[in-house]
Structures are given as structure tokens and as C-alpha cells.
Image: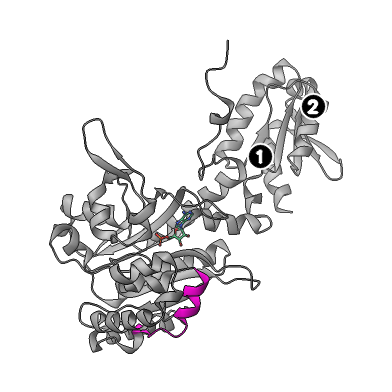
Amino acid sequence: MSRLVKKEILVTPKGTRDLFSDELFIRKKIHEKCREIAEYYGFQEIQTPHFEHSEIFEASLGAASDIVEKQMYTFRTRGGDQLTLRPEGTVPIVRAYFEDGMLSWPQPVMLYYVGSFFRHESPQKGRFREFGQFGLEILGEDLAVAEATIIRIFSLILKELGLEAALELNTIGDKECRPAYRKDLIAYYRKHVNYLCKDCKRRLKENPLRLLDCKEESCVELKKNAPQMIEYVCDNCKAHFKEVLDFMDAAEIPYSLNPYLVRGLDYYTRTVFEFVIPPKTPEEKRMEIGGGGRYDYLGDLLAGKPLAAVGGAFGVDRLSELLKEKDGFAEGKRPKVFLIQLGEVAKKKSLCLIEEFRKAKIPLAQSLSKDSLRGQLRLASKLEVDFSLILGQKEAMDGTIIIREMDSGVQEIIPFPKVIDRIKTKAKN
Ligand code: AMP
């Protein structure tokens, strides 16, 4: 048969990749930990479609946001609908909140999600076009305890995964206080307009807060002397932010204030936060691994109804990257025992033995398709198991089995029905 697909096409599209082996194992562990803690704290899972009507993102993320400007995968369907692969999780969830009648549930509604998101970005370390996020949303709650709960859960997840990140917090005010800040920010940047990058020149007109988010060197430099929101916040916003900080102190969550943290999207109000890995060298950039904030106006923007809410998301690819660098994290998946079988009778007996081990929740590796002792022992060494079980012709007839300690080569013969107990005892020592 001749090849139908060109060689160049036989690869994943740019910014995407296959997930398997250790990488997939680590992701599953991250998901497990996130789910376990979120569910304990009363969050329930929601799964929304991978695509939505484009307009809901365009209307709510802000026309001047990077996502709407250049990162959305938007397409027209055969039926003529204009759809977009979800670039983030909050907007679909607020859409679901109204569409699925969650407004009439006991408030607040606490939801979590795990899944893929899509942004047309330049791929680099920790940045993909299809990437994973784990997110939390608390909808229908205006108290600072909502921010505190989400940040607390995020910091617990990091701690239990054995990761350390710095938490940065800021308040970006509300409709009352932000206009005066906006005005002064525009005045400041107008004075220095020649030093702004091309994107920021345009942002200055459309969404000046976004200038604080720019990663271009000249804009980062200018930001250092820009007015700070914290000096403009009204009493209500100030009191709310103080409460958030009090919760952080009470839960002993270390944080630092970053007066220029605004996050890229229009829908945030009041509290914004980010978990970052600070750069280790001057050349390195800080890596954001997660973030979020309060978005009290998004409900109004989308559905014309007020909705106080807070949310945040972790980037699963970035957590996974960090865990991969940690020695031994993928170790847990490695079976400690390998079953070697020799001869027809032993092979048949092996199927039952594997099931006994599965029921006892002891990971057991095997290769039933192999026949030779050498081949199976080689595989056992490659997998770096602690023990091999050898079930030969003789043992299968006698009702025994050999346990071989792989490091020392020491072997013992034990009655077949005792093998699980013996392995459990040996594994403990
Ligand atoms: P955002 O929705 O932009 O606030 O992103 C939340 C988190 O998702 C970030 O802190 C990153 O860890 C992760 N993230 C965002 N964009 C990407 C991407 N293109 N590739 C991988 N991770 C991403």
C-alpha cells in the first residue's frame, strides 16, 4: 500500500503533544489531588463543552485582551454558527450557572473543573496551544471568605504535591474607584507613549490597565513608576481586601502584595492573585502556575444579572513540569513485583495470581507473552522491581512459588497461597 498521508503531517499540530507514560501518570496524580481536596471542601465537578458561542468570550474577556485579540480558535460550523474552542474556564461556567438554573440552588454554588483549554500562543517551555487547567469557582458569594477558600485550596494542593510557589495578591478596585485610577494611569502613560511597545500604544486607548500586564522590556521598565491602584481604592474595596489578607494571616498563608498585578482579563474586580515560581537567575522569567480573582460584573455582562463570584485556575502542564523535575515523583507508579512464569501450567495459573494481586492492591508487572526465564528476568531488572516471583513447571505442580530479591539474588520457596502475605511483609522491611 502506498502512503496516503505526507510525512510532515504525521506529527501533532504545533503546540500540542501526546501524553503518556510518566507525564500522564504525573497529570493523573495532580488531578487526583486537586479533586480530592476540592471535593472535601464542598466543590462539585462541572464539565462544560470544549467549544462555546464565540460571542460569550468576546463580550466578557475584553476586546483588548490577548485572548480575544489573537489567541482564540474560532471557526464557523457547517450550520453557520460562530464557535470558539474554550480559551478559559470561567466564562463557560458563568454561562452554565444561568443556563442550568443554578441561581435557584442554595448559594454559593461551588464548582471545580479539569480539562483542556485552547489558545493560539507561541509555544515555549510550559506554554502550549492545548493545555490543561484545574479550576475552582465560587458563584453567588460576595464575602472575602470566597477568595480565602480558593487560595487556601490552591496552597494546600501545592503543599501536598510537594511544590513551593509564591503567592502574590492585589486589589484592582471596582466601578467606584477604578475610573480615577484609570484616568491617572492614562495620563502617566501618555507622557511616556514613545517608550511603549506597539501593542501597548493601542491598549492605552482600549484598556490601559492591561499595560501593567505587558512583558515587553520597555513597558516593564515604565511600569515601575506608574501609579498604583492601592492608593486609589475606595473604602469598601479596601475593607474587602483587608479581610482577604486577614484570612491569609489566619490560615498562615504567606503572600506578598504586587501592586501591578492586574491579570489579563476585563472581568476581574477587587481581589486578584497569582501563584508564581520566582526566577532563579536574572535571565529567567517568573513562571505563573496559577491565578484568579473576583469577577463581580461578569454575570451582569453575560446575563444582565448581578453575580458576586470568585475563581481561579492552575495550569496543569506547569505543575506537571515542576513535578517532573522532582526526583522520584513518578516512582510511585513503578510496580515493585514482577511475575515470571515458565511453562503452560504456570502461565494458566498466572492469570489467577495476577487477579489476587490486583485485589490486594499490589501493583504487579508481568509479560505473559514471554516464555524464557532470561527474557523475563531482563524485563524485571529493567523495571527495577524489588522482587520477582518465579512460577516454574515444578512450582506450579507443587503448589509453591519462588520469591527472588532482585538486589541480592536471594531466593526463597514458599507455599503458593502465602505469596501475597509474604510480599506484603517483605515490602514493609
Ligand atoms: P489564565 O487563565 O491565563 O489565568 O491561566 C491560568 C494558568 O493556566 C496559568 O497560570 C498557567 O499556569 C496556565 N496557562 C495559561 N496559558 C497556558 C498555556 N498556553 N500553556 C500552558 N499553561 C497555560
Between marks 2 and 1 in the image, the one whose residue lies nearer the viewer: 2
Query: Picture coordinates of residue 28 (x, y %)?
Result: 51, 48
Circle 1 sits on which residue? 420
Tell me if residue 397 comes above or below residue 261 in the rendering: above
Task: Describe the element under mark 2 as helix, strand or loop.
Answer: helix
Q: Nearer the viewer, residue 99 or 421?
A: 99
On the picture, is 165 further left or further right than 174? right
Question: Callout 1, which amino acid?
Answer: Ile
Q: In the structure shown, which secondary structural element does the residue marked by tag 1 occupy?
A: helix
Is 88 drawn above or below residue 293 in the view shown? Answer: above
The reply to whether the magenta stretch includes residue 119 is no
Please name the residue shown 50% across and 50% down the image: 128
Q: Is mark 1 within 8 Å of ligand 1?
A: no
State the CA–CA distance, disc 2 to disc 1.
Answer: 24 Å
Q: Decide if residue 250 is on the left or right side of residue 184.
A: right
Residue 202: which quarter of the image? Answer: bottom left
Res. 149 image quadrant = bottom left
Q: Where is residue 402 in the image (x, y as percent from the top left)?
A: 78, 33
Q: Which quadrant contains ligand 1?
A: bottom left
Crowding at dot 2, Cα within 10 Å, few <14 / some 14-19 / many 20+, comes out as few
Amino acid, disc 2: Gly
Q: Mark 2 points at which residue?
A: 375
- Are there few (<14), some (14-19), or many (20+) residues within 10 Å of tag 1? some
* Part of the protein shown in magenta: 216-229
Residue occupying image coordinates x 49% and y 68% = 216
Residue 227 highlighted magenta (yes or no): yes
